[in-house]
Amino acid sequence: MAQPAADLHVHTTASDGTLTIEEVPAAADAANLDLVAVTDHDRIHPKLDAPITDHDGVTVIRGIELRVDTGRQRLDLLGYAVESTDELMAELDRLQQNRIERAQRIIDCVEDTLGVALNLDTQPGIGRPHIARALTDSDADYGFQEAFDELIGNDCPCYVPREITPIDRGIDLLTDACPIVGLAHPLRYDDPSAALDHAAKLGAVERYYPYDRAVDTDRVDAAIDRQSLLATGGSDAHGTTLGQAGPPASAVTAVRRRLEKR
């Protein structure tokens, strides 16, 4: 596969990534990228003061990844060049408060179950990866994945569900706030075909993604052609390495043109 020309799916310490916003330019340079989208979970990065900014020669798109509930499955939507509309910010504030309350319940359960102290502050952006990392640093003999598999993963003893935005509400909020809204990693869901059907309401889909198994991208290409979708892509980076996947130059040009029309 050719070297991607951008990484349009990057997480930072504003949610569950380990890359700070100040480290983004160097990470982009290391991957030979000049365009990066910061798409933290249910949160607009507080240090990005405009939809598109320049950071040491790297163009940074202020984005967001919002989880939504279809009633049948949960999907992730990616919004690019997001504006801080009142309705969106109210929803994100609600989601972040729920994240904090949920995280504290999980932490209390883990500490009571294992008899350890995690020493973890519950702040906006917190998610289960923070708890798993804290657990690996504690006196408990647990690795990161083991924490999910045995304690905090879905249906595990310390799992607590969180509030999810209904899909129609999520689409409306992001469409009002972003010039580009797309479906993230369509082939990760239990029912990819149903997920791709929702992309017609969005206008874009994450065509380029580092799946951990063989996938049939033909069905994504067919949806792009059938629904005239914009093809985006990114590495879904939660660490400090960018560019493990992303759109080629032709797709990036189309993304830039759409953003210029905002």
Image (cartoon, helix red, strand yellow):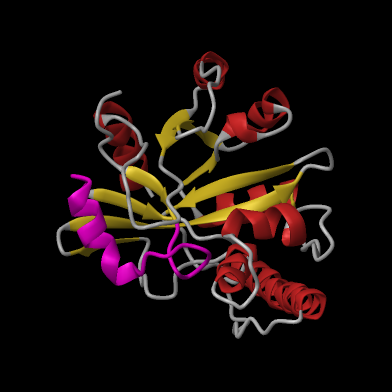
- Quarter of the image for residue 72 reads top right
Question: Residue drawn at (60%, 29%), measured in percent from left and top?
Answer: 187
Q: Is residue 6 visible?
A: yes
Q: Which residues are magenta?
A: 11-33
Q: Position of residue 35 (x, y in %)?
A: 26, 48
Describe residue 120's horizontal placement relative to residue 19 as left or right. right
Looking at the image, is 236 positioned above or below residue 144? above
Residue toward you, 190 or 68: 190
Q: Quadrant of the N terminus?
A: top left
Q: Which residue shows up at 50% across the image and 60% down it?
A: 40
**Is residue 14 a member of the stretch shown in magenta?**
yes
Q: Answer left or right for 27 relative to 97.
A: left
Front residue (pair 211, 90) = 211
Of all residues, the one furthest to the left in this rendering is 57
* Residue 91 in the image, given as x and y percentages of width and height: 67, 67
Could you tell me if residue 165 is visible in this image?
no
Task: Identify the residue at image location x=42%, y=35%.
Answer: 232
